[in-house]
Image (cartoon, rainbow, N blue to C red):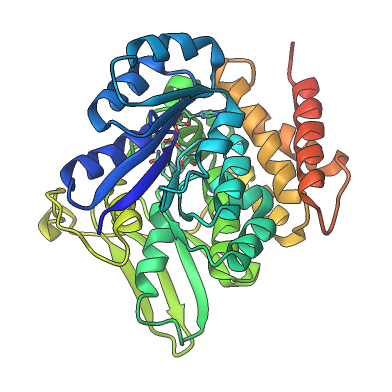
Amino acid sequence: MKKHLAILGSTGSIGTQALQVIRSHPDHFEVELLTANGNARLLIQQAKEFLPNTVVIADTSKLQDVRDALKEFPVKVFGGEEAIIQSVQMDSIDLVLTAIVGYAGLKPTLEAIRAGKHIALANKETLVVAGELVTSLAKEKAVNIYPVDSEHSAIFQCLAGEWHNNIEKIYLTASGGPFRGKDKNFLAEVKKEQALKHPNWDMGAKITIDSATLMNKGLEMIEAKWLFGLTPEQIDVVVHPQSIIHSIVQFEDGSMKAQMGLPDMKLPIQYALGYPQRMKSDFNRFDFTNYPSLTFEKPDTNTFRNLALAMEAMRQGGNMPCIINAANEVAVAAFLRNQSGFLEMSDVIEDCMNKISFIQQPSYQDYVETDSETRKRALELLPA
Ligand code: NDP
């Protein structure tokens, strides 16, 4: 039986790698829906190859171009964010890969869950912003959330056959990013071109900057809390520069299970799409002789303050993770426009944590308001 897929964010780093996986397994998958923000050219090319039932381009100024290009093809074309939310509920879809970046992924993910679609979750911001809401809705609708993030996929793979055993602790591994070992004086001068060069992973711009600031690891701790039902004390981070061990579970008997492999996002994407089956792949295989030493160190949360701020937000809960997410999205976008320095990103986040009203048990509307208030404040803090 083929799985019928929606890929939200098909033109991004995760989306295009997912389509590579799908291209290699035509007997397993059928593409029903592809969506993009503004990259009409790539969306058209993907639609011609995969012939989905529907494509949606969020930027409506590109809608006519996409319609014109696909008028001879059996593909429905819509525009705007509301069309993504409507299309993701199509009866024919079994599994939705959420690979939109940032807060924009929250609403479509919630609506997909509400419509009973299983989720392959790449868009970690969804769980950071509204983890409690998303996971309780998934439970109510009997929807499975399969992690795509490599660390969470690793934990998920380590837990296979262990569902009756309690987790004592998990260790999320972090590469440390391009600036591992550097001090604040160095970071004060860092430019976006340096921050965009990740040593091990080739990813979209936002997550690459988050990896350089270690915010990505903080967001992943919050994501892990919700995915695996853990307390903050059960989640630890270890820097492992080779990115071969993707994460580790420690059980109550002290035994540890780790999942390892070369850093290649196609592997966790394929595991999430194919679950519970491990499908064959021709991805490069790990060779022990190329990695005579795998090393581990503590993260430097004094220099990389974003990780400490995210840990604090996880500890406080409520709308605090939503606040750090919104402030971070604004700060990263400003850094990518050369409007903010590397260290100033943490200042913006910390200010928003101190100034935006804290809500212990937020509703969906509270998250929407928190996000918008935080973005406003964060923008005001940036230099003109
Ligand atoms: P990219 O920036 O490469 O791609 C983002 C995708 O989302 C694109 O298809 C983009 O369309 C679309 N998009 C952006 N904004 C909107 C919007 N407002 N409305 C609708 N669609 C939008 O990101 P990545 O693929 O790197 O990351 C996607 C998610 O996966 C992130 O949450 C990230 O944290 C997570 N992730 C990524 C990993 C990676 O290796 N890249 C690893 C683990 C997790 P367009 O191309 O038209 O702009």
* Residue ID at (33%, 34%): 52
Query: In which image quadrant can residue 147 be found?
Result: bottom left
Instruction: Tally the marks.
Output: 0
Q: Position of residue 253 (x, y in %)?
A: 44, 90
Q: From the image, which quarter does the C terminus lie in?
A: top right
Q: Is residue 325 above or below residue 162?
A: above
Residue 194 horizontal side relative to residue 229, left or right: left
Residue 42 position, x and y percent, is 33, 20
Would residue 264 be visible to someone looking at this image? no
Q: Is residue 345 left or right of residue 223?
A: right
Q: Position of residue 312 (x, y in %)?
A: 71, 55
Closer to us: 123 or 257 = 123
Asked whether the viewer can see residue 366, the reply is: yes
Question: 141 or 145: which is nearer to us?
Answer: 141
Q: Is residue 194 left or right of residue 125?
A: left
The N terminus: image quadrant:
bottom left
* Residue drawn 52% across the image and 75% down it: 169
Say if 247 sits above or below 340 in the image. Answer: below
Q: Tell me residue 43's x, y (percent).
A: 36, 23
**Which residue is rendered at x = 61% and y = 49% of the image?**
110
- Residue at image x 39%, y 84%? 255
Quadrant of residue 245 within the rendered picture: bottom left
